[in-house]
Image (cartoon, grey):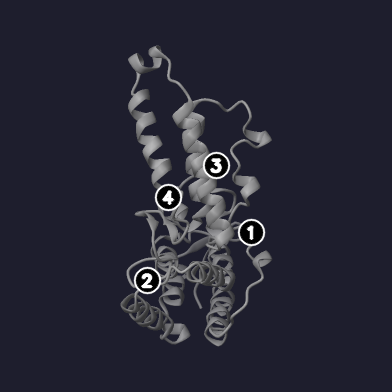
């Protein structure tokens, strides 16, 4: 089993190195990673009646974490927040997905702002302070109404350039997978492979957002472009079996012990 999983990863990395020149994307390939604008609509039928602040707080976390599944892996949240099978998903950063994310968070920000707190709640709890904090957080992660470029980062909120030399999905997402993707079972290992299998549409979604920003006249400074190219070139430079996405996976498989169908313990070693 370990050999099979390693071969799957090997073939994926090899394919990525061979397809670096790919220029087009079919957005339908990015299925299941990023909820559609309809899924993110807090006024959907499934949310009617959920008019309490605590429900809105949870919904805001769901909106952000389902859009950023690798960050959900970093936090190790429950599926009720990260979404079903979020450890197998990688995220969609296309212009359409970014627009849906910001729109949904702005909607819920308005809901939180307009919902009044009863005097008894203020007296008995930190309700008023919690509301103020969540108003700020939902506004922070929804970006600026007049600034639709860039992307929503899970640490710094609105980041002006989706590709840069310091952070961004092409840097942060692989690092989050390498550092935080748990592999404690065969299912976890398959999630890792599924996440890597979604890398090509993920990368193309980032490129499509960069192209949309550029078309609108929002162009990164030359120094950012040069340093970004250098950083990303270093990331894809290692041979497949020397790449961190491969070596970390192999190391975690070496440490994995599973129970076979006959109840025996088995360590996944070559």
Foreground pick, 63 / 194: 63
Q: In this view, does 269 lie above or below 184?
A: below
Q: Residue 164 bears which disc, if any?
A: 2
Whichever of callouts 4 and 3 sits on the residue coming sooner in the sequence is 3
Residue occupying the point 54% across, 54% down: 99
Real-space Cα distance between discs 1 and 3? 33 Å
Whichever of callouts 4 and 2 sits on the residue coming sooner in the sequence is 4
Instruction: Please name which of the two marks, 1 or 3, marks the residue nearer to the observer.
Output: 3
Whichever of callouts 2 and 3 sits on the residue coming sooner in the sequence is 3
Real-space Cα distance between discs 2 and 1? 51 Å
Left/right placement of residue 150 relative to residue 196 reads left
Which picture quadrant has residue 5? bottom right
Q: Where is residue 248 in the image (x, y as percent from the top left)?
A: 41, 72
Circle 3 residue? 80
Q: Where is residue 160 in the image (x, y as percent from the top left)?
A: 39, 62
SS at mark 4 in the image: loop
Instruction: Please name which of the two marks, 4 or 2, marks the residue nearer to the observer.
Output: 4
Real-space Cα distance between discs 4 and 2? 20 Å
Q: Residue 144 bears which disc, if any?
A: 4
Q: Residue 262 bears which disc, if any?
A: 1
Whichever of callouts 1 and 4 sits on the residue coming sooner in the sequence is 4
Question: Could you tell me which quadrant the N terminus lies in?
Answer: bottom right
Foreground pick, 163 / 147: 147
Left/right placement of residue 236 relative to residue 198 reads left
Real-space Cα distance between discs 1 and 4? 57 Å
Real-space Cα distance between discs 2 and 3? 32 Å
Instruction: Please name which of the two marks, 1 or 4, marks the residue nearer to the observer.
Output: 4
Left/right placement of residue 234 relative to residue 192 reads left
């Amino acid at each position: 089993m370990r050999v099979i999983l390693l071969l799957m990863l090997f073939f994926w990395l090899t394919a990525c190195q061979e397809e670096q020149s790919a220029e087009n994307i079919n957005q339908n390939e990015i299925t299941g990673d990023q909820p559609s604008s309809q899924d993110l609509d807090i006024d959907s039928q499934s949310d009617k009646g959920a008019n309490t602040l605590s429900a809105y707080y949870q919904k805001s976390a769901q909106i952000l974490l389902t859009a950023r599944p690798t960050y959900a892996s970093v936090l190790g949240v429950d599926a009720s927040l990260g979404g079903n099978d979020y450890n197998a998903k990688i995220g969609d950063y296309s212009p359409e997905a970014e627009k849906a994310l910001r729109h949904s968070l702005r909607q819920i920000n308005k809901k939180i702002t307009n919902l009044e707190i009863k005097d008894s709640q203020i007296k008995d709890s930190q309700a008023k302070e919690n509301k103020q904090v969540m108003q700020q957080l939902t506004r922070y992660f929804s970006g600026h109404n007049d600034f639709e470029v860039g992307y929503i980062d899970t640490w710094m909120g609105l980041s002006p350039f989706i590709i840069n030399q310091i952070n961004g999905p092409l840097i942060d997402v692989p690092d989050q997978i390498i550092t935080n993707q748990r592999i404690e079972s065969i299912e976890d290992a398959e999630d890792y492979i599924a996440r890597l299998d979604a890398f090509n549409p993920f990368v193309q979604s980032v490129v499509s957002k960069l192209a949309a920003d550029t078309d609108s006249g929002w162009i990164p400074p030359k120094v950012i472009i040069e340093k970004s190219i250098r950083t990303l070139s270093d990331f894809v430079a290692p041979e497949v079996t020397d790449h961190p996405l491969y070596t970390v996976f192999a190391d975690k498989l070496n440490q994995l012990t599973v129970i076979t169908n006959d109840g025996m313990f088995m360590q996944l070693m070559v």
